[in-house]
Image: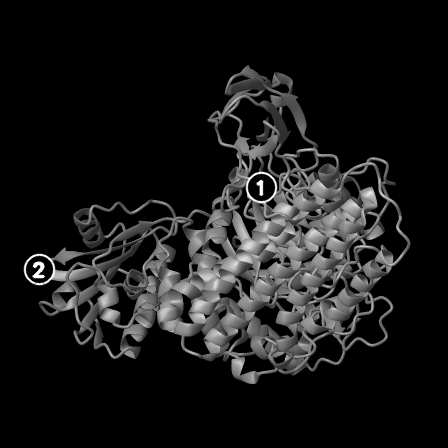
Amino acid sequence: MHRRSFLQAASGIAALPILGAEQAVSILPHQISTAPPQWAAEELRKALAGRGVNVTVRKSLSDVPRGEFCVVAAHFSAPLAQEVLKRARLTGSAEPEALAIATGQVSGRPVLLAAGHEDRGLVYALLELADRANLAPEPVRALSNGKSIAEKPANRIRSMSRAFVSDVEDKPWFNDREMWPEYLTMLASQRFNRFNLCLSLGYDFMRQVTDAYLLFPYPFLFEVPGYNVRATNLPDSERDANLEMLRFISEETVKRGLDFQLGLWTHAYEWIDTPKANHYIEGLNAQNHANYCRDALAHLLKSCPAITGLTLRIHGESGVPEGSYDFWRTIFGAIANCGRRIEIDMHAKGMDQSMIDVALETKQPVVISPKYWAEHFGLPYHQAAIRSLEMPHVDRDPNHGGLMKISAGSRSFLRYGYGDLLKEDRNYKVMFRVFPGAVRHLLWGDPQIASACAKITSFCGADGIEFHEPLFFKGRRGSGLPGGRNAYLDTSLNPKWDWQKFDYYYRVWGRNLYNPSTDPEPWRRYLTKEFKEGAPAAELALANASRVIPTFLTSHGPSAAHNSYWVEMYVNMSLLDPKKHHYSDTLAPKVFGNVSPFDPQLFSRMNDCAKELVNGQSTAKYLPVEVASWLEQYAASAEKHLSEAKKLAPKSPEFRRFAIDTEIQIGLGKFFASKLRAGVLFGIFQETGDREALKQSIRMYQSARSAWADFSLPLRTIYRADVTYGGEKFLRGHWADRLPAIDEDIASLSAVMDRPDPGKSSKDAGPAIKAALATVRRADSAGHHSPPAHFSPGQPIRVEVATSGPAEVKLFYRHVDQAELYESIPLSGTGDRYSGEIPAEYTKTDYPVQYYFEIHNGGESSLFPGLGPNLTDQPYYVVRRA
């Protein structure tokens, strides 16, 4: 888009008649009696008044002076709303949370209708107008621009989660009564509909605990009558203040029309090997534990009537052995008998049907929430397959894992994915949860990925998604430090509240999750206000930089755990030495080139790629050298646009923060691209003994090292020397700290080069080396396929694909169950049309079926439908049961 048209769109300027900023505005809450829309109407009034507009709230349309512009807030069912919508040729959707904004005239008066199907949709409409008024150069022009819209939500659950994990870093925001209204208003304005306050997620296992504040939450909030249970070193006054603060947060949440979810992730009360904890729990034992938790939960739900849902970790990391159904049945009695609707959200790891049945006994709504892309965030589709390490292992001892005997045994496939949860006719709902292994500390914002992800959040009838927000685990495991969660050494970069650094992140995600086809104007108006003429370039710079980590993560998964694998501040993994790593869940030998992709069905390992290049084989999988080419493209594009933005944007703290984190991700893109190439080249050397392959591997490794040094060393004056997300060295420190390990590994490779010539194999490594260094632009196969609308159990699924010419075509198919492996069959045909059948026996299933094609044509191999040119397409088809 041309810069002028971008600025016009972001300012709300249109060709229709507009009103000047000096004109008075009336607000008419029409037939509204409930609190959330009344609150939202007041937010609009304050936004306009804060911009110098004369605003009056009216009781009826007849009170509005002739010619005065009037904002009418109403439900779709109100006759006045129906009149305006009809004249605007809009139909308000009958779905919950649907909204409409329409200009028109009623009784000769110009009006702007903000309407919703029910309260929440109306809140969103009013907050949209408030947002326009807050950000536009001329607020009344932004309201009266003549643009009419009608939208409805794509996903039922659009949740943001914030965690208390550090008494040092989290007590300030937890107790900040000025911060909470602003933060929750921001979430509602960006159309999130649920806020989850997570407690007791500071540790996975209760060993060597140092910071136990709110770790077992109940004694930190109240005393339960009939039990002498307390947290040591906690004054009663502080305990009581914690409950009052929780009540305040929950009430402020529902005041804005949001659901308030409380996360209770730990029910352990004993710390193991823990001599230095700041708090211990007294008064509990195995005999009274379950009953205490039940009565404490009942007390909590009574004390905080604004709680609408509970998120519970059921597997062994809760401190309760997996399979303890009677324990959970006891606790769930408090939910069953609380006298109101409470949605039970159970974390999927370790989940089995027996546990689901215990939850269903409460007669409350039940949601199971699996992780999306393990504990990270990959490209915007659901993994075609999970890593082999997570697949079920039938030879495991049934008691393997102790506390974790289910999630580490027969149902290991649910540790890091949706597993077998997506069967048809299920009696529970499914919501995906995004852990902060990818977006943790750096600003992120790619509208294209956000839109694509929003479209597949309802995958196979799922209900939505929850994000662990940036900074989620800041200060975890007793690593909290004073001085602010953003960890800036340059304090001029600190916003008033830590979350304000991520305003753009919330805006891009919230608007797209609500409507993946939304107009980009809501985030562009924000960028225009902040960055003026530099806004268009800034948008493109961050968008391209934000693609680096999801792309690399998809192809490279040394650990599914966020508390091992921190891509933003990557700890180097050796190409050569399998002892120099910290990953427990990665393939042996544990070296860089042998790491599995997070989607091993569609992406190739470096070592496998090296073998294929040496042997002249053509694989349909995406290769590491392709991933390197994508990363190089994203980094170059981001660098170009950031350079332009720097020339045009004001040198404000907001832009400096934006530019710094964009530059880091550009540097990561260059680093990972070069290291991927180095890994493939080292694999070629291992296959052939060709010293030129080793030489080129070292050269690319040195290029990666230079990229890391270029962005990391300047950060010494920007970010603090210790950015902490845990006690281990790979979860804290500084980017510049990572350079010595890179240097050491390069030196090890150079030492191999200094050895006597190991000799060459009979294979010529030249073509493989050239391919490993090439910029790959392999396009997805050109073809056409129309998937069937549905399938009937016991009937074959016939598929036909048209190709661009004669080819060998193979069909891969699998039930939408990550515990299963793919089946494959060759398709038959001639010319450019090929067909085959998924067998009738295979369709006798409770699951949808997903499939894709491999097409081998003239020495070229590709996947169909593939990821598409922007890597945002779903790379397989899904057919659901009739």
**What residue sits 36% from the left and 72% below the top?**
532
Query: Colour scheme of this structure image?
Result: one colour
Image quadrant where one finds the N terminus? bottom left
Instruction: Specify whether residue 491 is in view.
Output: yes
Relative placement, left or right, of 645 versus 343 is left
Q: Quick check: marks 2 and 1 in contact, CB under 8 Å?
A: no
Residue 54 spot, x, y in % from top left: 21, 77
- Residue at image mark 1: 428
Residue 729 in picture, x, y percent from top left: 77, 69
Residue appearing at x 67%, y 67% in the figure = 706
**Residue 665 position within the rendered picture, expressed as x and y whole percent measured from the top left:** 58, 63
Q: Quadrant of residue 722?
A: bottom right
The residue drawn where x is 51% and y is 71% is: 659
Circle 1: is it few (<14), some (14-19), or many (20+) Cα within 10 Å?
some
- Judged from the image, the secondary structure of the residue bearing numbered disc 1 is loop
Q: Which mark is residue 108?
A: 2
Q: Nearer the viewer, residue 726 or 185?
A: 726
Q: Amino acid at mark 2?
A: Gly
Q: Does residue 524 appear to the left or right of 259 in the view shown?
A: left
Which amino acid is tagged 1? Tyr
Count of numbered marks: 2
Q: CA distance from mark 2 to mark 1?
A: 51 Å
Task: Tell me the crowding category of disc 2: few under 14, some 14 to 19, or many 20 or more residues within 10 angstroms, Cα based.
Answer: few
Between discs 2 and 1, the one toward the N terminus: 2
Camera-nearest residue between 540 and 169 = 540
* Residue 302 point in image, percent of width and height: 57, 64
Let me know if residue 597 appears in the view.
Answer: no
Q: Tell us which disc is closer to us: 2 or 1.
A: 2
